[in-house]
Image: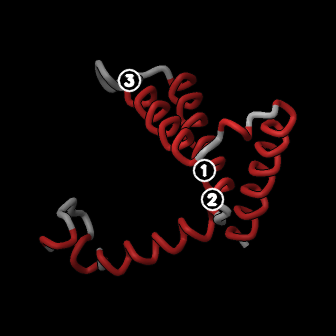
Amino acid sequence: MATTRLAVVEESVAAELRAMVAERDWGQFHTPENLAKSIVIEASELLECFQWGAEVDHGRVQGELADVLTYCYLMADRLGVDADRIVLAKLEETRSKYPVEKSRGRSTKYDQL
């Protein structure tokens, strides 16, 4: 049931983003290259929140995280891929690379386990 709820939320977010982009005619600027650049730029702004230590402005962190996620949703939409599906597929791949019995509590890369 949680996966179904997640899919409904994701579709709602994607629909809202599509509507906003269409209303403003921004789709013309949303090439995969431009969206990839925007993801990195926003991720850098998120990282900047932590530049000088662990004490952060949670509102600013949430705003920057939302920007990163927004561009990720837009990229998935532009590429015609289902964001939930590709994340779940990658999660399955990661699970096989990092079996619990070898990786629990460790940050070691999979090829060093």
Tell me if 18 is positioned left or right of 73 in this view. right
Q: Position of residue 90 (x, y in %)?
A: 46, 70
Res. 26 image quadrant: top right
Q: Are marks 2 and 1 in contact (CB under 8 Å)?
A: yes
For label 3, the residue is: 48
**Residue 113: horizontal and vertical position, in percent?**
15, 74
82 or 13, nearer to the observer = 82
- Cα distance between the residues tagged 2 and 3: 28 Å
Q: Give me the residue at 51% from left, 28% from top.
A: 61
Q: Hey, what amino acid is under mark 3?
A: Glu
Q: Nearer the viewer, mark 2 or mark 3?
A: 2
Q: Earlier in the sequence, mark 3 or mark 1?
A: 3
Q: Secondary structure at mark 1?
A: helix
Residue at numbered disc 2: 79
Residue at 35% from the left image edge and 26% from the top image edge = 50
In the rendered image, the vertical position of residue 95 relative to residue 72, given as above or below? below
CB atoms of marks 2 and 3 within 8 Å: no
What residue does disc 1 label? 75
- Its colouring scheme is secondary structure
Horizontally, residue 20 falls left or right of residue 57, namely right
Q: Position of residue 64 (x, y in %)?
A: 54, 29
Contact? badges 3 and 1 (CB < 8 Å) = no
Q: Earlier in the sequence, mark 2 or mark 3?
A: 3
Q: Amino acid at mark 1?
A: Met
Q: CA distance from mark 2 to mark 1?
A: 6 Å
